[in-house]
Image: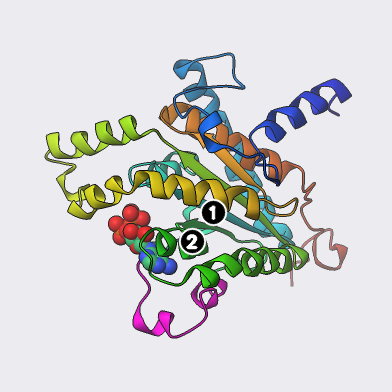
Amino acid sequence: MKSDKKAENEKKFYDSCRVKTGNNFQLSRIAPQDTPLVSFEKKEAVAELKKLNVRLDELQELLYAESKYKILIILQGMDTSGKDGTIRDVFAGVNPQGVKVKSFKVPTSEELAHDFLWRVHQATPANGDIVIFNRSHYEDVLIVRVHDLIKKNVWQRRYDHINDFERMLTEEGTVILKFFLYISKDEQKKRLQDRLDDCQKHWKFRVTDLKERKLWPKYMKAYNDMLPKTSTPHAPWYIIPADHKWYRNFLIASIIVNALQNLKMNYPQSPNNLKGVKVV
Ligand code: ADP
């Protein structure tokens, strides 16, 4: 059993990166290059991540065996913020059968002909599954706003639609963890440059990334508005300072492992409480 003090410290740790609802939220108060909450540096974080990878693999098996809960992990962030890297590094070592990744791209004409949550709902996890959204329905209040793709009154009412949708999912047994990978504009510049300098990374570079970069302030405004409006007790947003990949990975892996441990899952009993195999 964990001591009360340890449990209390852990709660503080996880609460401190959860976005609280209300009007006081200011994204600019958080520094993407900081590594708060930990007293150690890269080497130790990398070693800790390896342990978390192993623990996550164990918990995934338990989740699947018990088949009671569904886990939905949502990753949002600007281009180069590390969504792909997070999936690779945090889930390294987890049984590939146990995790599905769904990437949300520009909607097709069929998707656009439906309500914005239509394509999303189909991709949500079933009992025992972990599904990671690489981008998500949050694009429907972010990019659509920044590019004026739809009218203001339409994206504004979507905050309520999203909160209702996520509440329904959680009431039906889904645990939702939402991570905003917060990088600085300088770090994005470095990462984009790196993609041009390294011939093995050219494929990652898209000219449209530069166009989106120009809209940085508009995106930050949209995130600043969206995060406190859609961070709820049942589906909280965690802001992850993400300029340092080692910190990003460690923090996200810790939050996921903690959330799964809190479910207090158990392996099911043998069918009919069978004790032995009779030879026939
Ligand atoms: P990524 O940048 O995620 O690695 P892509 O380069 O294919 O993958 O980019 C996907 C693009 O699709 C992003 O620019 C994203 O903003 C866009 N997108 C996703 N969902 C929507 C949406 N609902 N409406 C408009 N654009 C969207």
The percent position of residue 275, horizontal first and vertical second, equals 84, 58
- Identify which residue is drawn at 31% across, 30% down: 186
- Image-based side of 172 in relation to 220, left or right: right
Tell me the magenta residue range.
104-122
Q: Which residue is painted at 42% across and 80% down in the image?
A: 111
Instruction: Using the image, tell me which numbered label, if any, was put on residue 262.
Output: none
Where residue 183 sits: x, y (%)? 41, 35
Q: List the residue tagged with mark 1.
A: 74
Mark 1 and mark 2 residues within 8 Å of each other at the beta carbon: yes
User: Quadrant location of ligand 1?
Assistant: bottom left
Q: Is residue 248 visible?
A: yes
> Which residue is located at x 17 percent, y 50 percent?
203
Give the CA distance from mark 1 to mark 2.
7 Å
Residue 93 visible at all: no
Task: Look at the numbered disc 2 and say if its residue's Cβ is closer than 8 Å to ligand 1.
Answer: yes
Closer to the camera in the image, 188 or 248: 188
**Placement of the C terminus among the 4 image quadrants:** bottom right
Quarter of the figure that contains the N terminus: top right
Residue holding disc 2: 136
The residue that appears at 49% across and 44% down in the rendered structure is 91
Q: Residues within 10 Å of mark 2 (few under 14, many from 20)?
A: some
Q: Nearer the viewer, residue 49 or 11?
A: 11
Mark found first going from the N terminus, 1 or 2: 1
Q: Is residue 215 left or right of residue 16?
A: left
By what rule are the colours in the image chosen?
Answer: rainbow
Residue 169 in the image: x percent, y percent?
69, 67
On screen, 116 above or below 83?
Answer: below
Q: Position of residue 83 (x, y in %)?
A: 41, 46
